[in-house]
Amino acid sequence: MAGRGGAGVGMIVTVSVLGVLSLTLFVLTVVFYGNYQGSKRELEANVSQMSDFVRPDEKERDDIRTIREAASKSRKSVVGYLNESMQTTMRAVTGSPRDTVTQLQTRLAGIPGAEGSSLVQVIQDQQASITRLENEVQQADADRQRALEDLANESERVALMQDSNNKAVAALNAEIGTYRSEVDRYREGINDTRKDMDARVERIITDRGDNEAKLSERIRELQNQNLVLQNQVAELRGEKNKDILKPDDEYALVDGQVAGLDSAANRVFISIGRKQKVRLGMTFAVYNNATELRPDNAGVYPRGKASIEVIAVDDDSSTCRVLVESRGNPVIKGDVIANAVFDPSKTYKFVVWGNFDADRDARPTPQERMDIEAMILAWGGEVVEELTGDVDFLVLGERAILPPPPRPGSPIEIMQEYIRLDRAVQHYNDLFNQAAATGLPVLNENRLYTLIGRP
């Protein structure tokens, strides 16, 4: 009984132990299964979170492996390693470790030339630009130094010039002071002279009344004497008519003929030469015949159809070049030539006065009278100053224009010029009146050109 009882208790205990063990195993199984499911869910969450940092396809990339190895050597996680590297990079680039790549790109976008370029390239470009600008600044500074030196030299030169100018101005002021004193003395002398002249003018005016009666009587006497002299001159001129070239006898001026032609060389050969006193440079007018030398009813002599100039002289002939030739009326053999002042046995005398336009600029001047005189001398004439009885021609230009008389107190130069013009006009009138009274031929400039054969 006792044995059966012990065996039963043992069975019960064994069963109880097994039951407890089974229950414990079940509980452990439930616990382990629960832990497994939790671990599995945690693993899936970790895998999901890990993909945010690195995707499975990126794990085997060389650059990712390099980063992982570098993080392992630094005993840091990849994220920590990358974060520390980013902060270090941003601190070096922007100065702030908290800046992001977007902020860096924003800042780079504001840098000219940075778009599409690497940061290193941008830095190199900026460094090159800085180097270039520093060189330019150094060159500019050198130029500035040279400019300052030049300015200093120029300032010194200007100062020397200013000092020289001041000395020159001082000397000029002193000289001007001397001149002013002399001018004052001259002015006082002029005033004294003017007072004396005024006094003399008053005396002259006072004496003029007395002299007028005497002069009037003298003028009447001279007029009577002039009439007598005019009659005597007329008689003398009548005796000289055979020697004077009168307008009615103009056709007698034929001096020779055209003996031959050389049309290709524009040459003319005439029948007079060295024996007839032909000289180089003489000019002859060419006419068809001697009758063309007669003046018309108005006393105007016709111009020749051509003008020739002597360029070579032989004993009995001369070679001439054609200066001017009428169109449609050429020089031919047998034409006659004439020069009013050419006479182998006579030299004509001329008196020349007035304003002339020898240069054909439409502005007659008294100075061109010398050109007219030189022209007459070149053609064999003689120019004299006085209208004596042996003068053959009076050549008058235009009468000088006399301005209104200057006012009292006008400058001496103006008064002297007025006196000169007044004398020139008076002499012009005296010559014309004397020639008209004596029957002397009076030639204007154009008639003179006609007589001497100038075109």
Image: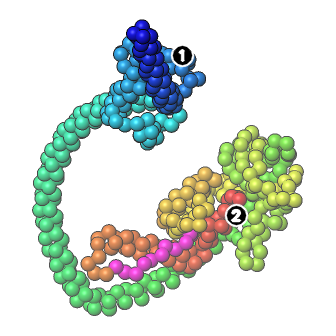
Residue type of the residue flagged with mark 1 = Asp
Residue type of the residue flagged with mark 2 = Thr
Q: Are marks 1 and 2 in contact (CB under 8 Å)?
A: no
Q: Residue at x 44, y 17 (%)?
A: 12
Q: Is residue 112 left or right of residue 61?
A: left
Q: Position of residue 43 (x, y in %)?
A: 49, 26
Q: Position of residue 72 (x, y in %)?
A: 40, 15
Q: Is residue 119 left or right of residue 444?
A: left
Q: Is residue 164 visible?
A: no
Q: Residue at x 82, y 62 (%)?
A: 290
Q: Is residue 66 left or right of residue 255?
A: left
Residue linked to disc 2: 450
What kind of secondary structure does the magenta stretch mostly adopt? loop
The quarter of the picture where the C terminus appears is bottom right
| Display coloring | rainbow
Q: Nearer the viewer, residue 273 or 266?
A: 266
Residue linked to disc 1: 62
